Image (tube, grey):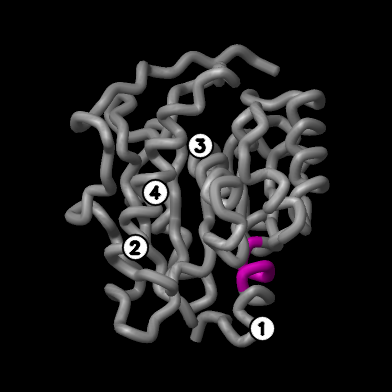
Amino acid sequence: MTSVSFPPVTRLTPAPSAIDDAAVRWFPHPPREDDRVVLLLHGLGSHEGDLLGLAPALPRDVVYASLRGVFACGAGFAWSAPPPVDPADPSLLQEAAAAVEGWIARTAPGRVIGAIGFSQGGMLSLHLLRRDARALDWIVQLSGRPFPAPMPGDAALAAARPPVLWGHGGQDALFGPAADEEVRSFLREHTDVEEVLRPQLGHGIDEEELAAVIAFVERQLGGDGAAR
């Protein structure tokens, strides 16, 4: 695994952080009263426009909400501290998860059914389930990992075993075989995981991984969510 350096993560606002409603990007439109919603959660140092680029290819029977990270990181945003992650300090990730939960409660209560997260956004997607196994019906976790410490909700998550698609690259500079096995073990013990490994892919998303995401989301929507 290659050593990678990141800019520091700093606060945008005093604690507790909240999702910036003005920065939320919707596809194909803001939700109507009966629309189901799927979250798009970007990676470290990125922004709400990043994963939105995938949305036109994704199934259309839901509305996609791309959220901006609640902390600053370089020219972009973050959901938690940069690697290496301190297993003794989940405070920023917990704060970000609480911010997302608060946004769901005031924006689309009971209608957010899933999340697609990349890297740190994948960690956050999984963390929402570790805080409340009923929070989401399913997640897509791309090139991310669980926070590396036990959480109070882990037993409930293992009992619920929600569907999870884990996509990752075999040439990812942020992961090695040992880290991959840690992710694999956690997901197998706590979720109904489907793994998609792209051996030549780095820390990114390629067309084959995107096709797996589309197929997975279609299945979670009952097979009738294809773009049309």
Please give the range of residues in magenta. Answer: 213-217
Check if mark 4's residue and mark 3's residue have beta carbons within 8 Å: no
Foreground of the two, 156 or 185: 156
Residue 200 at x, y percent in the picture: 74, 38
Check if mark 1's residue and mark 3's residue have beta carbons within 8 Å: no
Crowd around label 1: few <14 · some 14–19 · many ≥20 (10 Å): few
Residue 151 at x, y percent in the picture: 62, 36
Q: Which residue is mark 2?
A: 105
Foreground of the two, 156 or 191: 156
Q: Secondary structure at mark 2?
A: helix
Q: Which residue is mark 3?
A: 120
Q: Secondary structure at mark 4?
A: loop
Q: Secondary structure at mark 1?
A: loop
Tag 4: amino acid:
Asp
Residue 93 in magenta?
no
The CA span between labels 4 and 2 is 24 Å
Foreground of the two, 89 or 24: 89
The CA span between labels 3 and 2 is 22 Å
Tag 1: amino acid:
Gly
Residue at image x 39%, y 48%?
50
In the image, which disc is placed on residue 223? Answer: 1
